[in-house]
Image: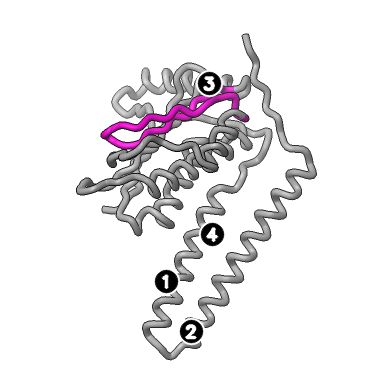
């Protein structure tokens, strides 16, 4: 049986990553403060409103950055909750303005902190790409994010209901996504059809994650015997606009 080990960054890389995240947060906070101050000082209603809109946009950008924070390494993280918060932040920051609804569903799954973070980076990039390139025509724009566990394999899909006028081109974003998936021991599957674009990331669980998944499965079986009418196998959330 093949074992997939987690290769963690060395301390210097982690220090640089924390410093970069800290700097980005400080720069966003500084920009928000400056723009808000200018809005207060302005005598023009139109200028004041425009500046406050920019400040609000930066607030939402900061929320996405915060949602993409790397969980504690070496510990298992609730991947469904992590991705749900991330999708909600991206929806409020970017997709609501485009009237794109996001439907999120996930099985109960716990991943090691860094691996959960990498999956979050993949989902964030895919949502951005789909929102940028999909052509919805007269359809109500809709994106779907699904996190599933099939045996010891994680399957995370991102798809849209728009038209796909041309095949998917492997640009810098998809290259990064492929490298992130490879670092998880997995790969990215893409498809382009009349129903829209579809991306599926698959990767195996490591040993600690397998034990957690087994324990969750046993707990579900016990709950099913006690309260069959209340058991839910997955979480589903509509994160889009009404």
In the image, which is nearer the foreground, mark 3 or mark 4?
4
Instruction: Identify the mark at residue 53; answer none if there is no mark.
Output: 1
The secondary element bearing badge 2 is classed as helix
Instruction: Identify the mark at residue 40; answer none if there is no mark.
Output: 2
Q: Disc 1 or 3, which lies upstream in sequence?
A: 1
In the image, farthest residue toward the right = 12
Q: Is residue 193 left or right of residue 40?
A: left
Q: What is the spatial separation of the Cα atoms under label 2 and label 3, in whole angstroms?
A: 55 Å
Q: Disc 1 or 4, which lies upstream in sequence?
A: 1
Q: Residues within 10 Å of mark 1 (few under 14, many from 20)?
A: some
Instruction: Identify the mark at residue 215; answer none if there is no mark.
Output: 3
The tally of labels here is: 4
Q: Is residue 81 left or right of residue 75?
A: left
Q: Main secondary structure of the magenta part?
A: strand
In the rendered image, the vertical position of residue 17 relative to residue 163, given as above or below: below
In the rendered image, the vertical position of residue 230 relative to residue 176, given as above or below: above
Query: Is residue 33 shown to the viewer in this render?
Result: yes
Q: Disc 3 or 4, which lies upstream in sequence?
A: 4
Residue at 48%, 18% (x, y): give it: 218
Q: Disc 2 or 4, which lies upstream in sequence?
A: 2
Query: Over which residues does the magenta segment extend?
Result: 183-205
Q: What is the spatial separation of the Cα atoms under label 2 and label 4, in whole angstroms?
A: 21 Å
Q: Is residue 20 left or right of residue 242?
A: right
Instruction: Identify the mark at residue 62; answer none if there is no mark.
Output: 4
Task: Judge whether residue 189 is colored magenta.
Answer: yes
| Residue contact between numbered discs 2 and 3, judged by CB atoms under 8 Å | no
The secondary element bearing badge 1 is classed as helix
Residue at 39%, 43% (x, y): give it: 130
Query: Is residue 236 shown to the viewer in this render?
Result: no
Q: What is the spatial separation of the Cα atoms under label 1 and label 3, in whole angstroms?
A: 47 Å
In the rendered image, the vertical position of residue 192 relative to residue 171, given as above or below: above
x and y percent of residue 1 in the render?
A: 62, 9
């Amino acid at each position: 049986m093949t074992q997939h080990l987690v290769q963690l960054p060395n301390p210097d890389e982690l220090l640089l990553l924390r410093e970069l995240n800290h700097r980005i947060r400080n720069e966003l906070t500084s920009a928000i403060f400056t723009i808000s101050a200018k809005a207060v000082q302005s005598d023009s209603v139109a200028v004041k409103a425009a500046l406050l809109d920019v400040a609000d946009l930066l607030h939402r950008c900061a929320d996405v950055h915060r949602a993409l924070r790397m969980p504690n390494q070496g510990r298992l993280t609730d991947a469904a909750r992590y991705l749900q918060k991330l999708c909600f932040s991206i929806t409020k920051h970017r997709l609501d303005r485009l009237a794109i609804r996001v439907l999120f569903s996930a099985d109960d799954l716990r991943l090691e902190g860094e691996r959960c973070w990498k999956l979050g980076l993949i989902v964030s990039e895919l949502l951005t790409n789909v929102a940028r390139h999909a052509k919805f025509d007269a359809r109500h724009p809709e994106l779907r994010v699904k996190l599933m566990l099939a045996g010891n394999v994680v399957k995370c899909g991102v798809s849209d209901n728009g038209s796909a006028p041309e095949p998917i081109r492997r640009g810098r974003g998809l290259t990064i996504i492929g490298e992130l998936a490879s670092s998880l021991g997995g790969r990215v599957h893409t498809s382009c059809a009349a129903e829209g674009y579809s991306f599926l990331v698959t990767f195996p669980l490591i040993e600690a994650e397998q034990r957690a998944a087994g324990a969750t499965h046993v707990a579900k079986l016990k709950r099913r015997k006690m309260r069959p009418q209340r058991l839910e196998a997955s979480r589903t959330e509509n994160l889009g606009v009404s």
